[in-house]
Amino acid sequence: MRYFILIFAVLVLIVIGVAGKRGDITRNSPIQIFPDMKRQLKLRPQTPNGFFANGLSSQLPQPGTISQEKPMLVGGKEVYSFEDAPVNTGRVTGATNFIELNALPITEKLLARGHRQFNIYCAPCHGQTGEGTGITKKIGAMAIVANLHDKRIVQLTDGELFNTVSHGKGVMQGYAAQLTVGDRWAVVAYLRALQLSRLGTADDLAPETRAKLK
Ligand code: HEC
């Protein structure tokens, strides 16, 4: 009986010692009796390695690689989303300067799309006219919402507006997850139309319309 208790106690200690730490977080590899190729040599991101000549573990697409993505057509040229192109970044290729004008040609269709998306994604805060008096202001959910007719914002480049819509600014979040690249440029185009509606003078009207006004 004495031996039984002793052996039992030792067994309990062994079981606790081996299995008791299960559930703890560890970076050690688990004991694997049949490894099943689950653990293999690999290149970790951000870790220098001698495998590729440039030392990076993530390589840029090799020439001849065919993307599964459908490219965007910009001025008759195909542009993929990974390219450093003004339409993707709002910036001059290879530089950090914002582009001055919309990367897409301004068409009635683009403005209509921008109108729709602006009223869905921007109007709740900025209001349908862009003054910053949307519903979130009314219910007090957002203290200060930018007035998009502010002189400073009117003077921003289209590229910077695109950047703000994509990545956000200050307390405003980015809308890249909700709006495609094309939609973001459409919203920028529509925002310009909203701003112009406040800045226009009678001289901008067609002569016949101006005559009617007088
Ligand atoms: C949830 C509320 C909210 C929504 C939705 C929202 N904004 Fe904003 N936006 C803000 C706030 C708040 C600011 C002021 C940010 C700051 O200065 O910290 C701002 C600022 C801006 C600015 C000025 C940036 C600058 O340079 O100061 C622009 C332009 C703008 N928003 C455009 C848009 C557009 C276009 C959309 C739709 C895609 C949009 N916003 C949707 C809350 C919102």
Image (cartoon, rainbow, N blue to C red):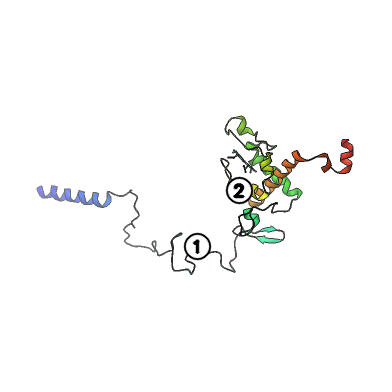
Q: What residue is pinned by disc 1?
A: 58
Residue 95 placed where, x, y %? Answer: 61, 57
Q: Are marks 2 and 1 in contact (CB under 8 Å)?
A: no
Q: Is residue 136 left or right of residue 41?
A: right
Q: Nearer the viewer, residue 161 or 179?
A: 161
Marks 2 and 1, how far apart in space?
Answer: 25 Å
Position above or below: 25 against 209: below
Q: What residue is pinned by disc 2?
A: 166
Q: Inspect this view and state whether residue 1 appears.
A: no
Please report the residue visible at 24 percent of the width from the left and 49 percent of the height from the top.
16
Q: Is residue 6 left or right of residue 175?
A: left
The amino acid type found where label 2 is placed reads: Ser
Residue 116 placed where, x, y %? Answer: 69, 43
Element type at mark 2: helix
Q: Inspect this view and state whether residue 14 appears.
A: yes
Choose top left, top right, bottom left or bottom right for residue 202: top right
Q: Residue furthest top?
A: 139
Please report the residue visible at 31 percent of the width from the left and 49 percent of the height from the top.
22
The amino acid type found where label 1 is placed reads: Ser
Circle 1 crowding by C-alpha within 10 Å: few under 14, some 14–19, many from 20: few
Residue 32 placed where, x, y %? Answer: 33, 60
Element type at mark 1: loop
Please report the residue visible at 87 percent of the width from the left and 36 percent of the height from the top.
213
